[in-house]
Image (cartoon, rainbow, N blue to C red):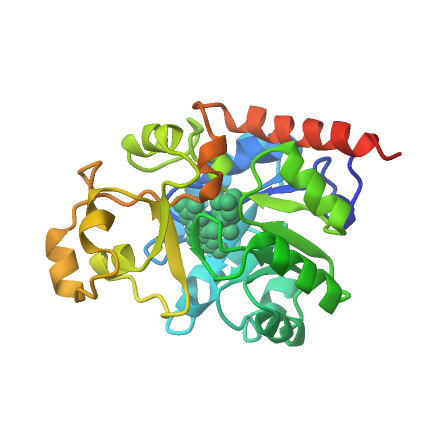
Amino acid sequence: MLDTWLTRELGISVPLLGAPMGGRAGGRLAGEVTRAGGLGLIGAARYNTAEWIEGEVRTAREIGGGAVGFGLMTWALADDDSLLTAVLEHRPQLVTLSFGDPAPYIERVHEAGAVVLSQINTVDDLRVVEAAGVDAVIAQGHEAGGHTGRIGTLPLLQEVLESTSLPVLAAGGIATGRGLAAVLAAGGQGALVGTALLASPETVGPDYARGRLVEAGSADTVYTDVFDKARHQPWPARWGGRALRNAFTEEWHGRGADEDTLAAAYTGDDPDIGVVYAGEAAGLVRSERPAGEVIRGIAEQAETLLSRFR
Ligand SMILES: Cc1cc2nc3c(=O)[nH]c(=O)nc-3n(C[C@H](O)[C@H](O)[C@H](O)COP(=O)(O)O)c2cc1C
């Protein structure tokens, strides 16, 4: 068994978190990750309601047996933090507050009994979330799917491990036991897995997303803001989103088109135009496998690899 700060803190058997993925990771996916021994996080997006959260929590708990986690985008709470209130009512075991300064919210999360982590993209971010009082940090690298920073996972992980006494996890490009073993051997306490789960039947989102991911190779992603602009998502400029390349990115990425132009050209119904956020680990996802199988496979391979050094 891989015994780390993360497994001890949460009472889980595998040092893996199912990444919070707005629009793709609901209660079914989170529940299956938890059932496989990790902890699955439900991705709470700005448009999700308290009713949606209640339904997803119920599903996650039915499948996973009780424990549940959530991931929220910190910058989106500034105008309206009712999503955080709705999440905390369900007494989750863990909440991630990523992309922004979580200081205004940490006390409430702790009072609700949850562990709080932040995904960070630089050492400057580390200093901000340390001062805010998070329990651990997640070094999220540029190769990650969805919104992320500009430093690769391995250099960022090393820099963060050298710079803090907090427990450190890694996110971005971890899709096999080799990746998890590397993180643990480096001194990390666990990893978030996102892209590796995105072809699983338990994900939500458009039907074409799973097939597109299986077809994609590791060079088939692009770090871009065109989908945020096309969908009127007011992400702060420092975070782009990594998605599969398609006809829309070929046409618009890097051209500086304004929001109205991009919105007029966009439709999520067309598989050649709709966004499929995914990371460079796309090349490691070769079939539509159940989430539990993916999680167990990563953990078993990491354990085998690390046992060589005992
Ligand atoms: C489709 C998708 C949606 C995401 N949505 C969120 C989100 O709502 N909140 C968040 O903190 N991170 C989000 N992320 C980032 C993930 O939490 C995580 O950092 C990333 O998936 C890890 O890299 P990997 O995809 O290479 O495993 C998203 C990622 C993807 C692929």
Give coordinates of residue 129: x percent, y percent.
Answer: 61, 71
Taking depth in this image into account, of 232 and 223 the one nearest to the observer is: 223
Horizontally, is 304 left or right of 241 in the view?
right
Question: The N terminus lies in which quarter of the figure?
Answer: top right
Which quarter of the picture shows residue 113?
Answer: bottom right
Residue beneath the point at 57% across and 48% down:
69
Question: The C terminus lies in which quarter of the figure?
Answer: top right
Is 3 located above or below residue 122 in the figure? above
Horizontally, is 179 left or right of 48 in the view?
right
Residue beneath the point at 62% across and 58% down:
155
Is 219 located above or below residue 106 in the figure? above
Is 310 located above or below residue 264 in the figure? above
Taking depth in this image into account, of 195 and 118 the one nearest to the observer is: 195
Residue beneath the point at 28% across and 35% down:
206
Which quarter of the picture shows residue 163?
Answer: bottom right
Residue 1 visible (yes or no):
no
